[in-house]
Every structure is written in C-alpha cells, then in structure tokens.
Image (tube, coloured by chain):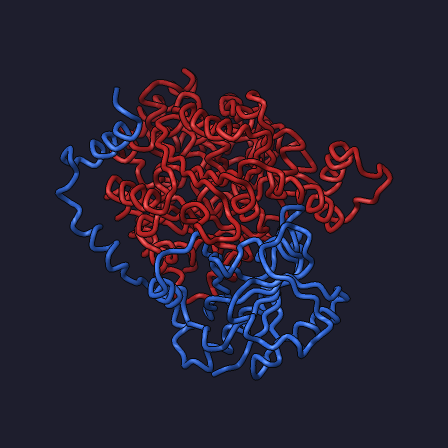
Amino acid sequence: MTSSRDAILGRLRNSLGRDIDGEDAHGEPSARLDKHPRGIIPARVNRDRGRQKELFVEMAAAVATTVDRVETADFVPGAVGDFLARHNLGADIRMAPDDRLSEIDWSKRPTLAITSGPSAGNDEVSVTAAFAAIAETGTLLLHSGPSSPTTLNFLPENHIVVLRASQIVGAYEDAWDQLRAAGKMPRAVNLITGPSRTGDIEQTIMLGAHGPRRLHIILVEDD
Amino acid sequence: MKATTREFKDNARAALADVGLQTALEKMETGFVVNRANAAAKLPEFEALRDQGRDIKNHTLENLDFYLEAFEAKVQEAGGHVHWAATSEEARNIILDICRSVDAKTVTKGKSMIAEEIGLNDFLEENGIAPIETDLGEYIIQLRNEPPSHIIAPAIHVSKSEVADAFHEAHTELDPGRNLDEPQALLDEARAMLRQKYIDADVGITGANYLIAETGSSVIVTNEGNGDLTQTLPKIHIAVASLEKVVPTLEDATALLRLLARSATGQEFSSYTTFSTGPRRSQDPDGPEQYHVVLLDNGRANLLGTEVRDVMRCIRCGACMNHCPVYSSVGGHAYGWVYPGPIGSVLTPTLIGVEEARHLPNASTFCGRCESVCPMRIPLPKLMRHYREKAFEEKLSPVTERAGLGLWAFFARRPSLYRWSTGLIISVLGVLGRRRGRFRSLPFTKGWTQYRDLPAPRGQSFQQQWAARSGRRTLGT
C-alpha cells in the first residue's frame, strides 16, 4: 500500500507534468532556498540610521505601543518604575534571564521586586530584551531561547521590552540576515507590532484580547 | 461540516430579511473597505507587491513537490513531525491519534479554516475530547453552535447583545446580574474565562498562514495573541495546513506578509506574526514538547493540473468578500459551507463538487471588485465563469434555465433576427407601457417584477439607436 505521502507527491508530480523522481526541474528552487533573494522592499526604510530610529518610534506609536527613550541602560530601572507607577501597578516584575537585562544595575530602583524565568500565568508585568526591531512597521523581533521565555511575551497584561537603538533595522529582511548570522532558527520567532487587540465584537477595536493590554518599549539610545 | 450550498437561494432570501444581519454587514463598508484603501494608499509599492506576490505563489505552485519535501526535511531536522493527509478523514484521525497519545481531555484551538474544512471540532467532541476555540470571534460562534460567517471575522454577523446572551448562557458560574452591555466587558469576560483553559489544555491546535521550506517553520498571524498561547502552553502543538501554504523562504513569506494585513483589516502589520520551528529545545524554559504539522491535500494536488489552479494562490485575507456586493447583502452563512464570498464561490465547487455548489458561481454580479482587490490577483470572475460553464455542460442547471439559454443562443447566433425581434419587443412594450411608464408584471419576468417594476422602454432598442448614430459615440455632442 502506498502511503498518503507518496500518493500526494505522486499526484502533485502528475499534475505538474513532472518525471516520477521529480529531480529534473529543481535547480532554480534549490538555489532560491540557498540564496533567499530579497524582493521589493518599501522605499520608506531607505534612510540613515537616525531617521530609521525615528520611523520606528513613529510606526510603533501608530499601533498603540508606548516608547520611553532613555540615554543609557542606567536609566532603565527608573523607566520601569515610572511605568508601574503611571499605571498603578504593583512592584512585582517577571524578568527574562537575559544577560542584557541582568547586567543592568537594578539596585537603582530598590522598590522593584524582580523574579526571573518563564511565566505561569499570574504575572502582571514582564520585562524582556529585544533581538531586533523593524522600523518599517514599528515591529519588535523577539525569539525563544534559554534566556528568553516565550510565555513572557504573551501571558502578562503588561509587556515591557528593553531595546537598544543600535538594534533597529529598516526592513524585516535585515532582521532575517541578523537571525541567520546568529545561528539556527530559534523554536519561536515573535514579530510583535503593538499590544494584543481584537475587532471581533461589532468591529470595535479593543486592546488586550488574550495577550498584553500594554506594550511598552524602553529605548536605550546607545547610538 | 455539512454543506447547505444547495439551498443558497433560500439561505440568501432569509439573510436579506434578517435585520440584525443587515445592520452588521453595513459596517463592513466603513470598516474593512476604507481601511484597506487607506493602507494600500500609504504604501507606494503596494501594486508592485501584488505582482510579486502572484509570482512567488506561481513559482511555488510550479515546484510544490520540491518545496513540500524541503519543508518536511527541515521540520524533521528541528525535531518535529510531518503527517501527510490525503483526505479530511485522514487528517482528523491523525490529529485524534496524537491527542490520544497523551490522553488529551481538552484541546485549545487557534483560528484555522482548514480545521473547519475537515470538521475537526465535531469529530473531537464525538471522541470525548473538548475543543476550545480561543480566537474571540471563534469562541463566540462556538458558544452559539454555528459556523464562521467570514474567514477573518468569524462572528461578524453577531451583535454585542447576542454575544452577551451567549455569555450569560454559557458562563453559568458568574453572577447572572452582571452587566455585559459594552464590548469591553464582553472581552474582559472572555479573556478571564479562557485564561486557565490555555494553561490546562493538553494539546494546542493552530492553522498556518505559511509554511516555510527554508526553515521548516509554520507561521501564524493574529491580533489577539490567542494563537501564541495555544501553541506555546500545551505539551503538544499541532499545526494543520493545506499543501499550498508552503512558501520557499523567509523573504518570500515577508513579501506576502506585506500584503496580508493591509488587504485583510487595513493594518500595516498584524499584532503577532509567529514563526514556530520544531518543539522546545533542550535549554528552553517553555514551549511545547512535541511539534506536529498535518499537511492536508483534500483534492488540491489534482487541482494543480487544471484551469482553476490560480485559486491556490489565495492567502485567505478576506478582501474579496469585504468588497463583494453579494456577500455584503447575504453574509457568509448563506454560502452554506466553510468558505464564503467570491473565494468561496470558486473554492466550494472545487473542493466539494459543482453539483453540490452549483449556485455559488452564480452568486456574483461580475462587477469585478473582488479581482481588483485580491492581493494575489486571482481572476475570481473568470474562475466563477468556468464553473458556470461546467455546470451548464454537465446539465446541472434546471431545464427551464437551460431552455431559456438555448432560446437566447438561437437568437444571438442570428444577428439580424436578434435585431429585428428586440426592436419589435421594444416597440410593443413601449406602446403597452406608454400610459404608466412601467410594468408591475409581465410574462416570463417574475424574477424581476417580484421585487420592482420594469420600466417601459422608450423609443428604440440600443442597437437601433447605435445604428442611427452610425456607430459613433455621440454622448455630449
């Protein structure tokens, strides 16, 4: 008995008018996988780095992401504390076990109660670090790994992301190149553009459907 | 899902008389339609991106066998499993077996049209497993025990008071006197009710907007984040997708993503676009322990060799139905199966047969608005015409309809007889209707006069007037 796999591939090759082994015509697709050529990239991202940063901030604001700009990483604990105060949130934060976060001197804001690790669903606020950010649409790229639990991006109601200005790229394709350079594809790659939202009740847009109600970026201007 | 496409005409009549539905559908023109137009206008490259998107899909379809095998190899390399399902039944059984391997009691689900196509929820329930829809719209219609009426806004036909009714009925553990008048209260309640279910579920099932051959990733696009909770928290993640969802590279997926949200909701980009590649890695603090992809054929492989192949470029954005005057009048349920609107009028006869779905290709004014907004430039009117012809050739339409067409064809093939007889009819009707200027009823025109009067012709037929003007445009002279 032929397996469904063989049957489906056989039907495909039959429909495509291919030889049974299907090897003859595959020079081009094989090269496409190796070279992953870029297509059209919107001209809006063709600008110098400084103006790319401004585009990112502008596009992020357009999707209801809030952005707090600080000069150095030393100001991050204060910015986190201010965010909590602004929204009447408690002092507990769940942080990703990430070197880029742990090297920050959190004792500058001693009132913060910091725990580290993935979320089990009862955290109000998470703090994570971005891998990259895409100016084109104000999008963050976060990925899973030992130091970056995916649950922190989705379960808490408030998601704070620490981003360095030097991590901002123009287009998605620039981020893919960085991801490829960093090694193999992580289990989860999350492109995040604004807080969770829905329009499923009478087409009324509301924030905080199942993911975070608030997405807050602390942008460290290290450039 | 049992198809009721044969009853399209009755379904449509009922929908037109449904005041609540008509109110809901009216909002589409000011919502989706305006938003899409704005989003397209803000991106000067939009039209060129549509050409590129069409070309990427055509290239992929031309090499679908290669890219599917490449995808499979990459999934396996990342520690995941790929299951090939020739039919809906096979897909359902594969999913059931995976669920049973961990004695699953509950399964959370992200929004998946393929899960609708294979009738997954009913099947899981029959086998003692509770499926829980997590997309807000899908959750609402699951409580109401009805199918989606739109491919990206499944509960578009439901009013907020109907949602409140459904929640009052389903969430009996909550205070019956609570106020659910505002959408925000409804959202907060759904969020709270589903939270623990995400965590308790044994298996999470999602669809896939794309499968990427280069990396072995499945991609989901959502605004709510429900799909991410569904595929991150349970022990097992199953992604169910049809064959044509595969694209070659991250760059190709990106090119299509630039079109998807803009065409669908008018957003520049959806809130969450997630690429899943294999199960949790050894050092990962979270994520599923098993990762499965179920690849569904269900007739698609054979389609590739036919003239309706273009329909396989579809990225399920819903723009065609948002812009369709027929969908906007009758809503999605009237179409009677999984896929409504113009794309449904082509996909349904393709997947369940022309005989079952004969009415759907006729549910079109051929205004061409669907094709004009389709990001993949699928020639939807041409494909509907193809199925109209097929239904005629296979003698599926009623005798009276065929006789009428035959009669018309007899005259159409004899131009002078056609001109003479239309001229005669025009002048006779002109004389008969001179006094009132319109007809309330006439023989053979019930389809028209049932709903409105037929204006009485004045003067001559079009061709007589054309001839009198020597075939020249004389408007405005």
Q: Residue at x 18, y 52 (%)?
A: A28
The colour with which the image depicts chain A is blue
Vertical placement of residue B159 versus B251, above or below: above
Q: Residue at x 47, y 57 (%)?
A: A145
| Number of numbered discs on residues | 0
Q: Is residue B269 left or right of residue B349?
A: right
Q: Quadrant of residue A68?
A: bottom right
Q: Position of residue A139 (x, y in %)?
A: 50, 65
The colour with which the image depicts chain B is red
State the residue in front, B431 or B223: B223
Q: Position of residue B442 (x, y in %)?
A: 54, 24
Q: Position of residue B280 (x, y in %)?
A: 46, 48
Q: Quadrant of residue B87?
A: top left
Q: Position of residue B257 (x, y in %)?
A: 42, 55
Vertical placement of residue B443 versus A24, above or below: above
**Residue A202 in view (yes/no):** yes
Q: Residue at x 70, y 41 (%)?
A: B193
Image quadrant in which the C terminus of chain B is located: bottom left
Check the image and name the residue furthest to the top: B399
Q: Is residue B269 left or right of residue B406?
A: right
**Residue B416 in view (yes/no):** no
Vertical placement of residue B350 versus A22, above or below: above
State the residue in front, A203 or A149: A149
State the residue in front, B236 or B146: B236
